[in-house]
Amino acid sequence: MVPVQTAEPEQVPELVERFEAVIAAEQRIEPRDWMPDAYRATLVRQIAQHAHSEIIGMQPEGNWLTRAPSLRRKAILLAKAQDEAGHGLYLYAAAETLGVDRSELTEKLISGRQKYSSIFNYPTLNFADVGVIGWLVDGAAICNQVPLCRCSYGPYARAMVRVCKEESFHQRQGYELLMTLMHGTEAQRAMVQDAVDRWWWPSLMMFGPPDGDSPNTAQSMAWRIKRHTNDELRQRFVDMTVPQAEHLGVTLPDPELRWNEERGSWDFGEPDWSELMRVIKGDGPCNTQRIEVRRAAHEDGAWVREAAAAYARKEKERHG
Amino acid sequence: MTDDHVYLTLAEGDHEAEARWAYGTGFADPLLGVDTAPAPDVDGADLSLYCQLLGDDALVLAQRLIEWTTHAPELEEEVALANLALDLLGQARLLLTRAGQVDGTGRTEDDFAYWRAEHEFRNVRLVEAENGDFAFSIARLLVFATARGALYRRLAEAAPDAVVRAVAARGVKELAYHQEYAAAWLLRLGDGTAYSRERMQAGLDAVWPLVDELFTAHEVELRLGLDPAGLREPVEAELARAIERATLAVPTARPLARIGGRAGREGVHGEALGRLLAELQVVAREHPGATW
C-alpha cells in the first residue's frame, strides 16, 4: 500500500512546484509521486464513486438477464454485466494505488458514506430499458469518461482507455437492440418510446448539476482531473443524441428541444434538478434496494472470503 | 482537442466502420469449416433429441449461474461465474440450433428455449435445482463439469454427428476450466475454516442424490450408442479425488427416486424447473412472433 502523504504544501515548496509543473506539462502523476492531500482525496472519491457505479450498475440490467427474450440477447447482456464487474475491478485497483483498499471502499458504499451514479437508482421496467441504458446511459458515460483518458492521474487515465472502449461497444449494442425493436411490432416500438421517456431526463442529469451549482469543478479542472464543465458535456451529449433519436424514430420527451442555428447546437429544456437532489439524498425509486442487494451479497459472501483467506494462510504455512 | 477526436471516433463514428469500435461485431462462426450435412445412417429425430438432452442441461445450468449475477461473494466471482454461464449458453445455442436442423422442423435455438413446455425440456434434475448457497452451487458445478467434460471428450471422437463433435471438442476446453474453478473453490471451502468446511460438506451431500441421473441412459442415448453408464466409474473416481484433496468425505447419499421410471431426461422434473422457465420465457411469450 502507498503511504498517504501528510506533508503540508507550505512545508515542501519544491514538491508542490514539481507537482504543478507535471500538471502544467500535461504529464501524468504516478502513485509514488508526491501529491497534495486534497488531490489524492478528490481522486479517491471520484474513482471509488466510479467503481461503485460500475458494480451497482450491474443491477438494473441484471434485472433482465434471466428474462432476456432471445438467447443471443441474453448472451450479449451477460457479457455486458461481466464487463461492468471487470471495470469495477480495475477502477478499485486504480483507487488502491492511492492508499485505500477495496474492502474499505465497499464498506463505505454499503454504509452510504460514498456515492455512485444516481442514474442507477431508477428501475428498469421493460426489456427496451436494456437498449436505452446502452444508448443513453452508456452514451452519457462515454461523454463524461473519454476526457478522463487524459486525466492527470496515470492509473485512472489508463484504466479509462479500456473502460471507454468497452463502453462504446455497449453503446453500439444498445443502439442495435433499439433499432431491432423499432423495426419490430407496435408493442416493441411502444416499449422503446416508454423507456426513452423514462431515461432521457435522468441521463441528462448524469452530467451533474449546472455549472453554477458545481463547486468542485474549478479545482478538478485546474488539476486536469476534469477537462470540461458539466454543462459543456451535457450539451455535447444532447448534440450527439438528437440525430441518433431521429434516425431511430423515437421522440425525446422535451418540448423545448430545437436547433439553434446561431450556436450550432440544440437548445433543450431544464432538467428537474429537485428530482436529482432527492435521488442523490437517498429518496430515488431504488436507492434502498440497490444498496441492500450489494450489502446482502457482501455479507452473505463473508464466510466464503474468510475461507479463502484461511486456506491461503494454511498453504503459506505448509509451503513457506 | 485530442479527446474530442477520441470521442468522435468512439461514439459518433460511422456505424458500419468496424475498426472504430473496440471489437468488431462479426464474431467468428464456431462451426466454420465443419461439415454440417447429417450423416445418412443416423436417425434425425434421435440426433435432435440427443442434442436437446445436452443443450437443455447447458441452458438450464447457464440460467442458474446467471442468477448469481450481483449476488456473488466477490467481484472476481462475478466475472468468473458469468464466464461459465456464457460458455454453457454458447454450447446450448449450438446444440439447440442443431436439434432443429436435423429433425427437419427448422426450429431455432429460441423456439426450443422459449416455446417448449416444461415437460418437453430434457435436462437432468441436477441442473435445475435452485442455487442454494455458494457451496451447493460449487458442488453442483464440480459434478456437472467433471461429468460433462468426460462426456465431451468422448463425443469429440465418437459422436455420430460432425456438429456435435465440433461442439464437444470446443466444450472440452471450456469444461476443463469450469472443473478447475469448482475444484479450486471446493479446496478453499473444504480446507478453509471449520464453518466453510461444514457448509461445503453439506453442499456436496445435498448434490449427491442428483448425480446418478447423469449416468442413467435415456433410450435415445442407447440407440445412438452413447450410453453414459460407462462414464460413471471414471467420473466418480475423479470427483472422489477432488473431494478427498479438499479433506472432505465422499457423500454416501442415495440417488433421488424416479417417478414411474422417468426423470428429467424423459421430461419429468422437480418443481423448480417450472419457475425457472416461467422467468426465462415470460418476455418472449408476451410477444409471439416478435424478433429481438
Image (cartoon, rainbow, N blue to C red):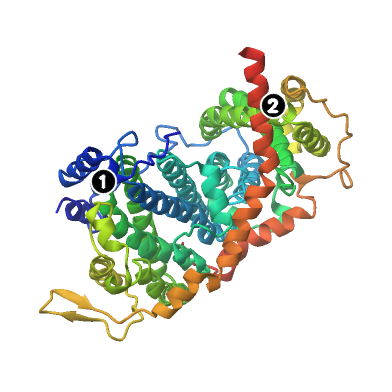
* In the foreground, A259 or B29: A259
**Callout 1: chain:** A
Q: Residue pushed farthest front?
A: A11
Q: Position of residue A192 (x, y in %)?
A: 43, 72
- Residue bearing mark 2: B187
Q: Is residue B58 left or right of residue A146?
A: right
Q: Position of residue A174 (x, y in %)?
A: 39, 60
Identify the residue at image location x=17%, y=74%: A265
Quadrant of the image containing the C terminus of chain A:
top right
Of badges 2 and 1, nearer the viewer stands: 1
Quarter-of-image position of residue A272: bottom left
Number of numbered discs: 2
Identify the residue at image location x=42%, y=45%: A91
State whether discs 2 and 1 lie on one chain.
no
Quarter-of-image position of residue B125: top right
**Callout 2: chain:** B
Quadrant of the image containing the N terminus of chain A:
top left
Identify the residue at image location x=72%, y=37%: B140
- Judge whether A78 appears above or below B114 on screen: above
Q: Is residue B66 visible?
A: yes
Is disc 2 placed on a helix, strand or loop? helix
Q: Position of residue A114 (x, y in %)?
A: 49, 57
- Residue bearing mark 1: A152
Residue B143 marker: none
Q: Position of residue B56 (x, y in %)?
A: 65, 45
- Asked if marks 2 and 1 touch (Cβ < 8 Å), the reply is no
Amino acid type at mark 1:
Ser
Is disc 1 placed on a helix, strand or loop? loop
Q: Is residue B112 left or right of residue A100?
A: right
